[in-house]
Image (spheres, helix red, strand yellow):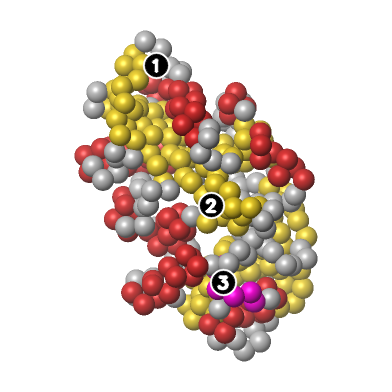
Amino acid sequence: METHKVTVNGTEYTLYKNYQNLERLRLKFNAMTTNFWGFDFENFYQSTFWDSSCMLYTLFLEDEIVAHTTVSLFKTNWNSKQLLWAQIGTVMTEQRFQKRGLARFLMQYIQGEFKHQVDGMFLFANDTVTEFYPKFGFIPVDEYQASLSGVFANTGQIVQQLNLDCSSDLELFENYVEQSIPTAALHINNKGLAFFYTYAYPEFGYKQVIYFLEQLKTVAVAEIKENTLTIVQLYQLEISPLEDVIHALAHTPVTNVRFGFTPLGLKTTFERYKEDDLTLFVSENLAEVFEQQKLMIPMLSHT
């Protein structure tokens, strides 16, 4: 944990960083996130998968949280280079303290701290604040979701549904998450967030749809609704044709396949994608990547 006294527009605040191990402060943070977003981080903390890649930046006025931003770090591969990106998320300011420059202070502080540490930054902004982030050099870009049409049916592959409450299944899944080869054009590796979605919070629905395809050395987070198979994420230890993975997962006939990431090695169609009222903003040095390529930030990498 770090603390710093800072002054914003004439008022002194305390900036707390990475204080999640201090229960008193963590519970205050959880209360704020519940109020703003309808969930908290307690299950994530208790799961033990909250690692150093998820960092808290919170302003306190005496004993009260007044503003917060989370930074998540991602290792990614692009053009055969390993890069480090930062995602900004859970941005919030208590209503009584809005319009005091607190969110602006945190944004500028974080940008200054990571200026020479990361190769790019991105965030998802709802439609009510799209005019805020360009002030810090962020540019809105389109995302594209990949899909396939055809007739897909199971070819006899054995598919095992994983139960992450079983220690052996949890260990197997963790190994695949850690050791997976790139399966996406934009391969983003953040183990903590993967377990945030699939393990710590069953209400997201992903914990119940994790499948092990042993013959294909693949673990898939996938679900079928009506005739559409959505492959949210893949973790592979060896390259296996995606067509084989699709057929294995199609336990009922499927005519449409959608991906929660941009798959490698598969000729797909693309449609502009927008999750609810969210727009992807990227730092200037990443804008060209998204403007020239039809890409999607993997669904299990959102904050």
Q: Position of residue 55 (x, y in %)?
A: 40, 42
In the rendered image, which residue does mark 1 sit on?
8
Q: Pick the residue in front: 57 or 198.
A: 57
In magenta stretch: residue 235:
yes
In the rendered image, which residue does mark 3 sit on?
236
The residue under the point 50% across, 67% down is 179
Which of the 4 image quarters holds residue 256?
Answer: bottom right
Q: Position of residue 168 (x, y in %)?
A: 36, 77
Which of the two labelled residues, at mark 2 and mark 3, occupies the earlier sequence position? 2
Q: Start and end of the magenta stretch?
A: 234-240
Residue 65 in the image: above or below residue 48:
above
What crowding class fits label 2: few (fewer than 14 Cα within 10 Å), some (14-19), or many (20 or more)?
A: some
Q: Pick the residue in front: 201 or 189.
A: 189
Q: Secondary structure at mark 1?
A: strand
C-alpha separation, residue under disc 3 versus residue under disc 1? 48 Å
Return the mark for residue 59: none
In the rendered image, which residue does mark 2 sit on?
75
Residue 201 in the image: above or below residue 8:
below
